[in-house]
Amino acid sequence: MKVKITIEYCTLCQWTPRAVWMQQELLYTFNEQIEEIALRPTNGGVFKISVDDQLVWDRKEDGFPEPKAVKQKIRNKIDPERSLGHSDK
Amino acid sequence: MKVKITIEYCTLCQWTPRAVWMQQELLYTFNEQIEEIALRPTNGGVFKISVDDQLVWDRKEDGFPEPKAVKQKIRNKIDPERSLGHSDK
């Protein structure tokens, strides 16, 4: 089962590099499990990550995510048995 | 009218960095006109760019695209009157 991941982020806050970085982290970790990973430029201080349109991270709730925290949330959702290896466990 | 751009690329050929580079070029040039820009990892030597599901570039036909060439094709499609500035005219 491949998933679609979406990163919605505020361009007025200059968060494009941060969104691209997170995208690459997720691409390398979940490469085989990703159908599509999309960036959605927006505004209003948004930085949200969704999997198949279900929100897994919202900056306004939990602050800026470290890749490890996001990877664990996505792993728990799409492949709970999988170990993320020594750095992202 | 905002558009969805898709970059489908072969991961076995290690083209993730190239796809992310093209994505950023298009994001910075068409920022206000992009609803979403998605990466779709695949295999088989594919490197294709589509706008609203219409193919604008296929590596197998035209080789690897320079950003300038892709930007001109996208501009001609979504905003024919727009100048792309001195480097991408």
Image: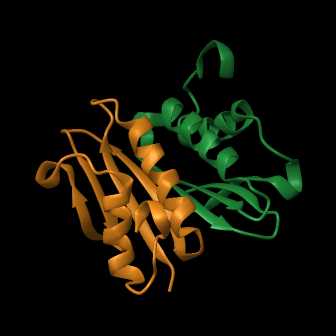
Chain colours: A green, B orange
Residue placed furthest toward the top: A86
Q: Position of residue B70 (x, y in %)?
A: 33, 61
**Residue placed most toward the observer, B79 or B13:** B79
Picture coordinates of residue B34, whole percent (x, y) = 53, 71
| Residue at point 25%, 46% (across, down) | B64
Question: As drawn, is A37 to the left or to the right of B14?
Answer: right
Quarter-of-image position of residue A52:
bottom right
A47 or A12: nearer the viewer: A12
Residue A36 image offset from top left, x and y in percent:
43, 52
Q: Residue furthest left?
A: B61
Which quarter shows the C terminus of chain B? bottom left
Residue at image position (39%, 40%) is B18
Q: How many marks?
A: 0
Q: Percent x, y for residue B54?
A: 27, 72
When the figure is inspected, residue A79 is found, relative to residue B3, above or below; the finding is above
Residue drawn at the location 36% of the way across and 74% of the way down? B52
Q: Is residue B33 above or below residue A23?
A: below
- Relative to A55, does residue B82 appear above or below in the rendering? below
Residue B80 in view: yes
Relative to B6, is A62 above or below? Answer: above
Depth check: A3 or B34 in front?
B34
Q: In this rendered view, identify the residue nearer to me: A75 or A37.
A: A37
Left or right relative to B47: residue A51: right
**Does any portion of residue A89 appear in the rendered image?**
no
Q: Is residue B56 left or right of residue A79?
A: left
